[in-house]
Image (cartoon, rainbow, N blue to C red):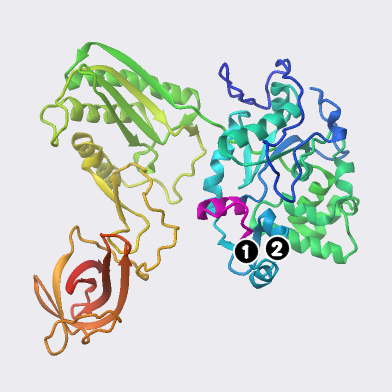
């Protein structure tokens, strides 16, 4: 049984099972690009002459012996370069290319116009285009920055697959019926992506994934039943467009080179061979390539499902000021919420507890629920979390800071399940459930956090920075707050690995002496006045058995808060390893190594 997501009234999204009698929209040219010049090497989106035939709701004609699904592809050209240029703030007219340290991975249209091609060595690419801006490859950046494009497409079609950053697959039959025609669907997809993200895109629709990918590169809407004829004349290396992972690309490229040496030139040459023979001789990758060349699919697009948040709430009349009374109401709400979660076969990663007081104050706290140590979500666990939170809000004996509002009766209580995903979508632990000690420790920590408030219990995470202290970011325990400084950015002057294990809350003043008992100083040329021999701390004198450095660090040299310091690593006679910093002639202990 297939579950069809419900489309709210006024929502322009569609599923592959949208009603066939949906009111058609005015037929307009296929997905025209926004006004303005088009990138070099691409064509403006327009209807192919053969695409004038409207798509009926009847079953799609397939290639004999093959199984293909009517698929739409949204393609953002040169996405790795677009994402890298946006992150580095490179002007659009500047020739740019993304590289992996040895060869060009992708290039922009201005760079291609000067002869830069994928696979070129960096030196060769710079000879073709001396002003070429070289940017490092970053798969995480490409994936992260492409999410707004996927969200924009999901406002029109509920259910899509991101084949790779820059490329989206979605089922076309139901979506085209919902929006009136394939031409209207393509037009709305291109316009929505441009309006919401500012990116130009092209849409192709055909039977089968490979045909759809190739159609998207020329903004073509291929009528049903013409996939075999369309693919027949394409060269074998067109298969590379359907390979979505680096390993798959390498394997496919090797097969294409081998088949070319054997005399195969086009996809028609490959599809003329028997699939069983290709599978026997070239393995699973050969079978995949043969099916792609025939216009068949191994599977339909793997559609991701958007799950809305699930919430329950109630008005408290009369207002509640006792914890036990509020907890009784919370139990009823928790049971209702848990029943809804079970009914929809979903789970959630966060639980938001909200309340409004009689004085007009809105209170809200979010708890994490996706930790396997707790054994899964249940009505009892939801009730416990709400009760702990209510005690912090209603109890006058709770721990409160300066400026915290006084307890006030509650007039409304709500519980919302956030981060909702289909049940079974998250992988469990490899080595079984957590121990009872871990479960009890977690529950005690949550109990303390419920009394002290979310900011009363903090955990340390890593963030970008140069010094050991700058890389520590404290967040409320259990919350997934993003770090303010990204770890994957370059940080010139960053301390070398390994990183220290312990960073004290405040650096301790120490004295570093040489063998003659004189303080060790570092001049502007990073020359030390003597080799470190003795470290004087609050606990006494310690002999230095080894040291490394110094490493200089100058920050904000352009402003009034400019700071210059040098770092030294020392090993003491008791095998303790420390990180020392010297600022203005004063040494401090910044961190300890394991």
Q: Residues within 10 Å of mark 1 (few under 14, many from 20)?
A: many
Task: Specify the segment rendered in magenta.
Answer: 80-98
| Separation of residues labelled 2 and 1 (CA atoms) | 9 Å
Q: Which mark is residue 96?
A: none
Determine whether, in the image, residue 526 is placed left or right of residue 225. Answer: left
Report the number of numbered marks. 2
Query: Residue 219: where, in percent of width, then height?
Result: 76, 40
Give above or below for 271 relative to 314: below
Whichever of labels 2 and 1 marks the residue nearer the N terminus, that label is 2
Mark 2 residue element: loop
Given this view, does label 2 or label 1 mark the residue nearer the observer?
1
Identity of the residue drawn at 62% across and 36% down: 194
Tags 2 and 1 in contact by the CB under 8 Å rule? Answer: yes
Q: Is residue 175 magenta?
A: no
Determine whether, in the image, residue 60 is placed left or right of residue 40. Answer: right
Q: Is residue 93 magenta?
A: yes
Give above or below for 524 relative to 179: below
In the rendered image, which residue does mark 1 sit on?
A: 132
Query: Residue 290: where, in percent of width, then height?
Result: 81, 51
The residue lying furthest to the bottom in this view is: 516
Query: Residue 555: where, in percent of width, then height?
Result: 32, 64
Question: Which corner quadrant of the image does residue 66 belong to?
Answer: top right
Mark 1 residue element: loop
Q: Quadrant of the C terminus?
A: bottom left
In front here: 503 or 491?
491
In the rendered image, which residue does mark 2 sit on?
A: 116
In front here: 278 or 115?
115
Query: Residue 172: where, in percent of width, then height?
Result: 72, 31
């Amino acid at each position: 049984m297939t579950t069809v997501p419900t489309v709210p009234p006024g929502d322009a999204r569609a599923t592959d099972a949208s009603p066939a009698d949906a009111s058609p929209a005015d037929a307009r040219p296929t997905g025209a690009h926004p006004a303005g010049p088009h990138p070099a090497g691409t064509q403006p989106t327009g209807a192919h002459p053969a695409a004038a035939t409207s798509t009926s709701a009847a079953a799609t004609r397939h290639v004999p012996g093959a199984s293909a699904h009517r698929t739409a592809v949204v393609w953002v050209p040169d996405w790795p370069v677009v994402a890298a240029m946006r992150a580095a703030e490179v002007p659009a007219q500047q020739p740019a290319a993304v590289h992996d340290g040895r060869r060009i991975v992708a290039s922009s249209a201005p760079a291609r116009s000067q002869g830069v091609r994928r696979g070129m060595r960096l030196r060769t690419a710079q000879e073709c285009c001396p002003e070429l801006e070289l940017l490092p490859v970053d798969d995480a950046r490409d994936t992260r920055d492409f999410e707004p494009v996927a969200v924009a497409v999901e406002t029109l079609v509920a259910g899509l697959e991101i084949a790779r950053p820059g490329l989206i697959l979605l089922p076309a039959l139901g979506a085209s019926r919902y929006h009136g025609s394939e031409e209207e669907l393509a037009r709305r997809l291109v316009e929505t992506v441009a309006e919401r993200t500012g990116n130009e895109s092209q849409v192709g629709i055909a039977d089968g994934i490979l045909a759809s990918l190739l159609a998207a590169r020329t903004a073509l809407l291929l009528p049903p039943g013409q996939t075999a004829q369309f693919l027949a004349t394409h060269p074998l290396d067109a298969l590379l467009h359907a390979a979505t992972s680096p390993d798959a690309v390498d394997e496919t490229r090797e097969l294409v080179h081998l088949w070319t040496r054997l005399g195969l030139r086009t996809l028609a040459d490959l599809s003329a061979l028997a699939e069983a023979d290709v599978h026997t001789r070239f393995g699973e990758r050969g079978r995949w390539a043969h099916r792609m060349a025939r216009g068949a699919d191994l599977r339909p697009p793997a559609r991701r499902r958007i799950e809305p948040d699930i919430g329950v709430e109630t008005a408290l009349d009369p207002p509640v000021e006792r914890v036990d009374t509020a907890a009784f109401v919370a139990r009823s709400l928790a049971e209702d919420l848990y029943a809804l979660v079970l009914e929809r076969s979903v789970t959630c990663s966060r639980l938001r507890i909200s309340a409004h007081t009689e004085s007009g104050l809105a209170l809200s706290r979010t708890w994490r629920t996706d930790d396997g140590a707790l054994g899964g979500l249940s009505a009892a666990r939801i009730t416990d979390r709400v009760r702990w939170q209510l005690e912090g809000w209603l109890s006058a004996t709770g721990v409160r800071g300066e400026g915290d509002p006084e307890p006030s009766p509650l007039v409304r209580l709500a519980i919302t399940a956030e981060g909702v995903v289909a049940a079974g979508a998250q992988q469990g632990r490899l080595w079984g459930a957590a121990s009872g000690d871990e479960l009890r420790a977690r529950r005690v920590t949550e109990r303390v956090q419920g009394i002290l408030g979310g900011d009363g219990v903090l955990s340390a995470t890593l963030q970008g920075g140069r010094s050991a202290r700058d890389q520590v970011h404290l967040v409320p325990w259990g919350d997934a707050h993003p770090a303010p400084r990204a770890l994957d950015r370059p940080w010139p002057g960053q301390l070398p690995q390994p990183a220290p294990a312990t960073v004290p809350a405040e650096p301790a003043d120490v004295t570093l002496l040489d063998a003659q008992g004189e303080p060790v100083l570092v001049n502007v040329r990073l020359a030390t006045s003597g080799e470190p021999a003795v470290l004087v701390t609050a606990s006494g004198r310690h002999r230095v058995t080894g040291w490394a450095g110094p490493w200089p660090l100058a920050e904000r040299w352009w402003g009034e808060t400019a700071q210059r310091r040098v770092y030294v690593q020392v090993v003491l006679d008791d095998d303790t390893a420390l990180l020392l910093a010297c600022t203005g002639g004063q040494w401090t202990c910044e961190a300890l190594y394991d």
